[in-house]
Amino acid sequence: QVQLVESGGGSVQAGGSLRLSCAASGSIFSINVMGWYRQAPGKQRELVARITSGGSTNYADSVKGRFTISRDNAKNTVYLQMNSLKPEDTAVYFCAAVGVYTASGSDDYWGQGTQVTVSS
C-alpha cells in the first residue's frame, strides 16, 4: 500500500516562506513524476509544480521565480520551497505521485492535502 504524507503547511504573512514536504511510503521501486497541486475555495485544483525522476521541472506561471520544487529519489520525497508568499497562494496543497511502480505495477497517488494560509 502506497501512501503520501505531506507536512509543512501553516499560516504565514505575505512575503514569508514555507517549505512543504511529501514522503511516499510503501514497497516502491520508482516514481516517475512527483508534484504539487493546490485548490483554493471555489476554484479548481491546479498544478503548482512537478518534477521528474531525472530532475526536469515545470512550474505554474503564477509561482515561477518564487517557488522551487526538488526531490530526493532515494527517500521518495518531494519538497516545495515557497518564498515571497502572497495571499493568493492561500489554498490546500496536495502532493501527487504519477507512475509509482511497485510489484503490483504502476499507479498514481494523492496526498491528503495540507493547508497554506497567507495573510496580508
Image (cartoon, rainbow, N blue to C red):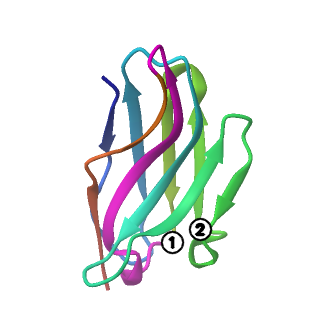
Decide: is 16 above or below 19.
below
Quarter residue 12 falls in = bottom left
Q: Position of residue 14 (x, y in %)?
A: 38, 78
Q: Nearer the viewer, residue 70 or 25?
A: 25
Magenta residues? 84-104
Instruction: Count numbered badges in the picture.
Output: 2
Q: Residues within 10 Å of mark 2 (few under 14, many from 20)?
A: few
Instruction: Read off the residue under disc 1.
Output: 84
Q: CA distance from mark 1 to mark 2?
A: 6 Å
According to the picture, the residue beneath numbered tag 2 turns out to be 66
Q: Residue at x 57, y 59 (%)?
A: 49
Identity of the residue drawn at 37% across and 77% down: 44
Q: Which quarter of the rendering shows the N terminus?
A: top left
| Dot 1 or dot 2, earlier in sequence | 2
Up-down: is 67 above or below 23? Answer: below
Query: Is 105 contained in the magenta span?
Result: no
